[in-house]
Image (cartoon, rainbow, N blue to C red):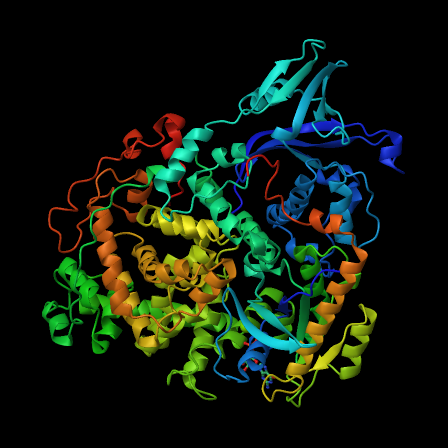
Amino acid sequence: MAELLKVIFEHEGIFLHPSPDEGGPEQDLLVSGTLRVLEKDAEILVEYRPLEDSVDPSNMLCAGQDSSSVVEWAQCPGEKSQSRQQLETQQSYETEWDMVNAISFRKKNCTNGEGSLNHSQERSRWAFSVNISDLKSITVKDEGWTFLILKLKDAFSSLPALHFHQGGSKDFLDCLRRFALLTECPEDKTCLMVSTPNRALSQSFENLLDDNNFGLVHKFKRDPYVATLGSFSKVTNYIYDALRGAEEQQQRPPEEVADLLGEVIPGLEINQQEEPGFEVITRIDLGARPRVSRAEPLSADDWSKHQDPEGRMKDEATLRQKIFKGGLCHAVRKEAWKFLLGYYPWSSTLEERKSVLKAKTDEYFRMKLQWKSISEEQERRNSRLRDYRSLIEKDVNRTDRTNRFYEGLNNPGLTLLHDILMTYCMYDFDLGYVQGMSDLLSPILYVMENEVDAFWCFVSFMDQMHQNFEEQMQGMKTQLIQLSTLLRLLDLAFWNYLESQESGYLYFCFRWLLIRFKRELSFQDVLRLWEVMWTGLPCQNFHLLICCAILDSEKQKIMEENYGFNEILKHINELAMKLDVEEILQKAEGICLQIHSCKDLPHSISSILGFDAKRQVPNQAGLGGAPRPAPQQDACSNGHCRESRPQNSCRGVSTS
Amino acid sequence: MTARKSLLKVILLGDGGVGKSSIMNRYVTNKFDAHLFHTIGVEFLNKTLEVDGSQVTLQIWDTAGQERFRSLRTPFYRGSDCCLLTFSVDDNQSFLNLSNWKKEFIYYADVKEPENFPFVVLGNKVDVTERQVSAEEARMWCQENGDYPYFETSAKDATNVAVAFEEAVHRALAADDKADHLIPTDTVKLHRKPRSATACCS
Ligand SMILES: Nc1nc2c(ncn2[C@@H]2O[C@H](COP(=O)(O)OP(=O)(O)O)[C@@H](O)[C@H]2O)c(=O)[nH]1
Ligand SMILES: [Mg+2]
């Protein structure tokens, strides 16, 4: 399952005072670090992590520019925060490990190993993570500052005292009180006994019985406390796990992989770590899915009928609608795509477009000249440009090579692809070239058959796709979260199944989203799909509904065959070139109408699809006109768990 | 000693363009597709083979090499039984980057004993005449870095591809046997994720 990690409490400047024997060679060691209370996979953990440099500041992980250490790889200057994240990822494996023992104070000094690993081990020597339910007591002492001694139920293990030199002990205890009962020990007033009640167990069972679509209620394999803090879908996991239990050993790697991916897509946690019952609120009765039909592609005749004598395109809305419904005949594409992509304004005259073209042509060649005129000498000193160029050269040779426009050796199409991508690096040097961009350019260049037009249309398309390719790939993360949110509304049973197979964050849709199905469909079908998407109809983020439509078709197979994490990934990867574009579009439009006509749509959903704004849904007059009141509390329409949800619990599904 | 593994996860790592995907395809489908796309995301293929009279499924993982995608690539390193470090003999930079790939792998796969982990090194594209890396250089590197087996392969004409994977399988199984001997069963449990933090209901 995806890693669910929420920081509930955090306080820096908590010190450990290891005794000399624990401190090893470093006498008088004071370890400074951060104390956190975390909710992770629906468990409450108390975690302590020393500051990175508290062991030895000279061990900072930033090696020199051309050091070959992997940590340095992760840490180019200016990418500090990113690499810190990665370090945390590394550390959290250890946390997992640690929980096996219920305690995890590391006493073993790890010596061998390579530099970078050594540092993190050095640090994690003082790190610990304990499940709150494994805590027995907390003793509160004062020596001019407060320090706490945490005792574990397991009498054989102990944790170091936590010294709150900079305050915060009271907040920490208050935070724990939210999840556990702290009662004064009668014999010792400074000692608080910790107990963790089994909250809402019965309620969770109710949901389980009620919601279980598979009739598989067998047994909980897990601590009921954990299960009930988790959501319904988590509970389902345990059922699947119980069924697949024998294979646990074999299942482990995918599970770890999934956990790590969950950390990489952190936004998802916000989504999933909603209070108990979040899934339940999205179980709104969706009405039947309307059947819609597709139309014929817009013909050249039709297109020219929409043009006035000066060349303005009349009745843009109808045009868009027609293109949405049937796409374009190939002959119209070269012109129509320029409007769809915003290179030409719909209302521009032929004259105006001529002058746009002239200006754009000048601008293009000015930028092209920039990289063309860089000498080898200069390029030797420009590693980023060199890297972009080398990647582009490699990828151009591996993009659509079976297409006649790019096939064979020395095909001019390849040179154009290369030159446009290089020029794009000059247009947006920060982004430069990222793998996947050649896939986005290739169909555009194929349609435009013209370097300048293709470049500017590509620029427009990249404006939409930019975030996917940025350093942090925020666009990808956001989309995966949104997709997960939509899928949960549409098909909770399937979503739960995916969750139970560690696939709830839908990583397997990565390629679909990164390059908008470019590799999933035949070249001609990609052209059709893209022009339909560029109309902006019938709703915002329609491509996410296309994902839902494809998944809907694969659901049966995936669930019947009981595919696990790896098999799902493989199955989805292997759908490439087997999909029918018209069928997908039809289904996706049906889904859009189905969601749109649903009452009490959660705000999270309507904002992903842009239903809050006034938008007309095609062919369903009267549906899309009125803005829908943004449901707040009433989003919990099926009334399952309203009481367990705090007021703000409808928020938090990330939307953009 | 526990039963031998019947599923082995093998991962191909190396710079973009060295031929990882082509090698995988050559081995699994015995084809070379000169029109292959560059990899986006993560893919894997299975191949079943017989080792010492029993069936072993080889799960071969292939990833995209670009820096930008590292965070979505590295989680898949976990649980690998063998890593095939790949470079191209006509690209010196890809050879120089081998140690980066090795480190990245060890770091993210969370290999507990890197010295004992089975790596196999592939110098691909030996069919190409303009070499930038000599076989001696490559062997030297392998020797100095942990005595790794080295194969000069060509996905294009199939040279040494199957042999290299078979060696990977043997190394992985040997490492697995060794681990079974050395690590008491307790420790094996330690590696496992806490499915049940505190057992309660059953
Ligand atoms: N001559 C030759 N070319 C190869 C060989 N293996 C791969 N290639 C080519 O090298 C390029 C990169 O291969 P690819 O498998 O995509 O590399 P990857 O990025 O490492 O997966 C492609 O154009 C392949 O056709 C080989 O053994 N010999
Ligand atoms: Mg590849």
* B96 left or right of A205 in image: right
Identify the residue at image location x=52%, y=27%. A198
x then y, percent, for residue A126: 75, 36
Quarter of the image where one finds residue A12 = top right
Q: Quadrant of the C terminus of chain B?
A: top right
Q: Quadrant of the N terminus of chain B?
A: bottom right
Quarter of the image where one finds residue A545 = bottom left
Quarter of the image where one finds residue A304 = bottom left
Q: Does residue A640 lie above or below A390 as drawn? A: above
Q: Closer to the camera, A587 or A381?
A: A587
User: In the rendered image, is residue A37 in sight?
Assistant: yes
Ligand 2 placement by image quarter: bottom right
Identify the residue at image location x=48%, y=53%. A501
x then y, percent, for residue B162: 64, 82
x then y, percent, for residue A244: 52, 53
Identify the residue at image location x=84%, y=49%. A111
